[in-house]
Amino acid sequence: MPARLPALRFGLDHPVGEDAAALATFLAGAFGPATVAVIHYGSRAQGRPTRPDSAFDFFVVVDHYREAYTSLAASVGTAYSARTATFLAGILAPNVIAVTEHAGDTERRAKCCVISLRDFRQACSPHPRDHFIQGRLIQFVVAAWTRDEPRAAAIAGAIAQARANTLAWVRPTLPDEFGVDEYVYAVLRRSLAGEIRPEAGDHARTLVTAQTETLHAIYRPLLAELARTGLLTISPRGETYRLRIPVGRWEAFRNRWYFRRSKIRTTTRLLKHVALYEGWLDYIVKKIDRSSGESIVLTPRERRWPLVFLWPKVFHYLRTRPQRRQ
């Protein structure tokens, strides 16, 4: 795959907003010398409408987990130990944690996916363990802070590789003939289907609409390059593409298994919120409310002992969530 194509790095050097830039710098300091890069992604990075209390989404890439979590505990304080966070990262990276910056009357909240550079590169490779990282990096992201030029180049190369991988896993769900619009929609739709998502409606279409310029800048040159190298055939007018080699049964099976395994791993990763994510219960309830418009009211007993009494509502939500009704 043409991972060295310059277009695959589009957006990484874009400027970030004042709040996001300040928060990225704060996170780099909080995680200490182990911090390699802070990558801004998600709704705020893409410019989609958000609520004032919505967190800023970041990947925090570090050299070593133990060193990074020890620094975080010393700088902002954590309810969990560096040993616990390091252990859980070793089982199923990345950890997702909340970090809040207090600066006078200003409070900024970050949702951080903390991952080592080694795990980051593996997650962006053509053979990732699951789709969690690639599903976010194939969209608009910004390198809000990097330690130095060599690390910036390493991060950019890994993200370019993740974007170059898209054809390999979207092939079974592409239409017979497609242009860049159909391609990016198929990529995001297939990616979202690999997770349990709370959004109502066609969220893939929402993401495409919010990032049309970026997605075209990344994937139009990629499609042209894939046609040049013979993986796609291009129409005489150069507007649409077809797969040169049809999808076989074995490829389709492996694709389904990859996304099924990814959904299991991504869902399991949510269980770590109980140990690591400050205010995890309110975060999940508010996210469901923001994304789907469905309010979940918790009883005092459910709030006090959620791991005992919340399961009926969890199973009901999984059966009736908006994603399953699309």
Image: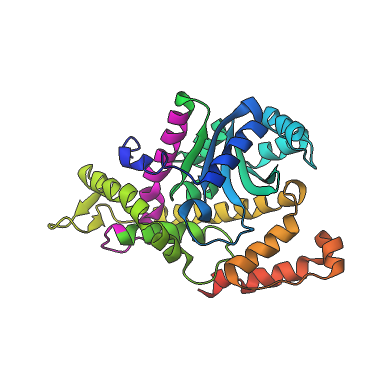
Q: Looking at the rendering, which quadrant does residue 286 occupy? A: bottom right
Q: Looking at the rendering, which quadrant does residue 291 occupy? A: bottom right
The image's colour scheme reads rainbow
Residues drawn in magenta: 152-180
Viewport quadrant of the N terminus: top left
Q: Is 235 contained in the magenta span?
A: no
Q: Nearer the viewer, residue 51 or 292?
A: 51
Q: Is residue 80 above or below residue 286?
A: above
User: Residue 168: image x %, image y %?
Assistant: 38, 48
Label the magenta part by its dominant secondary structure.
helix
Q: Is residue 62 left or right of residue 97?
A: left
Is residue 129 something that shows in the picture? Answer: no
How many numbered marks, from 0 up?
0
Q: Is 156 contained in the magenta span?
A: yes
Q: Is residue 109 above or below residue 81?
A: below
The residue lying at 62 percent from left, 37 percent from top is: 26
The residue lying at 43 percent from left, 58 percent from top is: 188
User: Residue 157: image x %, image y %?
Assistant: 41, 34
Q: Is residue 83 left or right of residue 207?
A: right
Q: Is residue 113 left or right of residue 83?
A: left
User: Residue 231: image x %, image y %?
Assistant: 26, 47
The residue lying at 67 percent from left, 36 percent from top is: 90
Q: Nearer the viewer, residue 272 or 304?
A: 304
Q: Is residue 46 left or right of residue 180?
A: right
User: Residue 160: image x %, image y %?
Assistant: 39, 39
Q: Is residue 209 above or below residue 34?
A: below
Q: Nearer the viewer, residue 1 or 217?
A: 217
The residue lying at 68 percent from left, 60 percent from top is: 284
Is residue 80 something that shows in the picture? Answer: yes
